[in-house]
Image: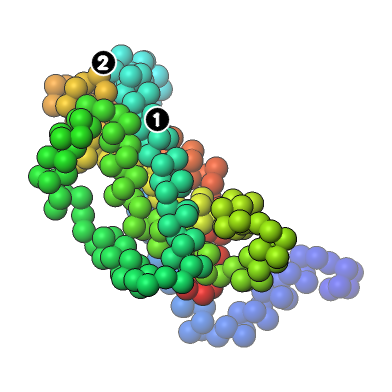
Amino acid sequence: MSGAANPSLSLGNGMASHRRRLGARGILELVSIYAALVLVLMETIYPLLWVLFGSLKTKQEMLSNIWGPPSSLVFQNYADAWRIAGMGSRIVSSVFVTGSALIILVVVATPCAYALARLRFRGRGLVLAVAVAAMLVPPQVMAIPLFMVARDLGLINNRLGIAFVYAATSLPLSVFILRSFFVTLPADLEDAARVDGASRLAILIHIMLPLIRPGVALILIFGFIEIWNDFFLAFLLLRDPSVQTIPLGLVSFFQQYDSLWTLYFAALTITTLPVIVVFIAMQRQFIAGLTAGAVKG
């Protein structure tokens, strides 16, 4: 049988030819790159697997088999963690706060970014500089004035109020990201729409916004991860247990039941699962958003 008719032989010849082109140094570099990637992958995945394994063990097995997989699956840990930690009400609070904050963020950040990218007005550079500077200021620095302002506005123990606070803290980065997407769009699209009599608002909603969907997806993913996992602002503004979010519930649960590691890991798994699901569902938009806005800025 000839080499052209034997796929395995052709593949072997191709691999041998590829190795000759790479040389010993090239092969060593390639092996080093893949080894580093495998190491990073294991470093990222194993902590998640460790928490998942711990959530499915008994208390005795957790002490005797800390690092390995469970010998049997104990799903009762999830039911107990859900009941003891009050996960139901806290998940409702987290979903409401996160969803409201993301809606506010998109509604406010989109026209702000469009104005900075397309409109010519005095002080535009200063506004952009202030937005960039605000990205460098962590919320912890503004804890005291933020609490006083929230108290005066009646935002303490108010889930919608803290949603506005979350949207405000995520606004500078979101405006910066969306502006980079608006800048990449050709001005001819707006000129043609204005010739047809479209207003600025109509151009933004019907023409520009569909074209920057990767950017919107990018700020939604970043905002969701930050708000869903936030502890500091929730601890500062949500003092009533009935309106507290998941991170506060996890800390309270661990303080009361610090020896129930299996239940704590189950609660952590319940908390982390939505973040993983959202990222997997939107990973294509996330990657497109990271690359599309970097063309020109």
In the displayed image of the protein, which residue is found farthest to the left? Answer: 144
273 and 123: which is toward the camera: 123
Q: Check disc 2 and give the amino acid type.
A: Ile
The residue lying at 52 percent from left, 64 percent from top is 181
User: How many numbered badges does the structure rendering display?
Assistant: 2
Can residue 290 be seen here?
no
Classify residue 90 as left or right of residue 26.
left
Mark 2 = which residue?
84
Badge 2 density bin: few <14, some 14–19, many ≥20, Cα 10 Å: few
The residue lying at 41 percent from left, 42 percent from top is 104
Image x and y of residue 220, in percent: 45, 47
Image x and y of residue 191, in percent: 66, 68
Can residue 183 be seen here?
yes
Label 2, secondary structure: give it: helix
Image x and y of residue 76, in percent: 36, 15
User: Is the residue 162 above or below the residue 42 in the image?
Assistant: above
The residue lying at 41 percent from left, 22 percent from top is 73
Q: Check disc 1 and give the amino acid type.
A: Val
* Numbered circle sitting on residue 95: 1
Image x and y of residue 145, in percent: 12, 46
Mark whose residue sits in front, 1 or 2: 1
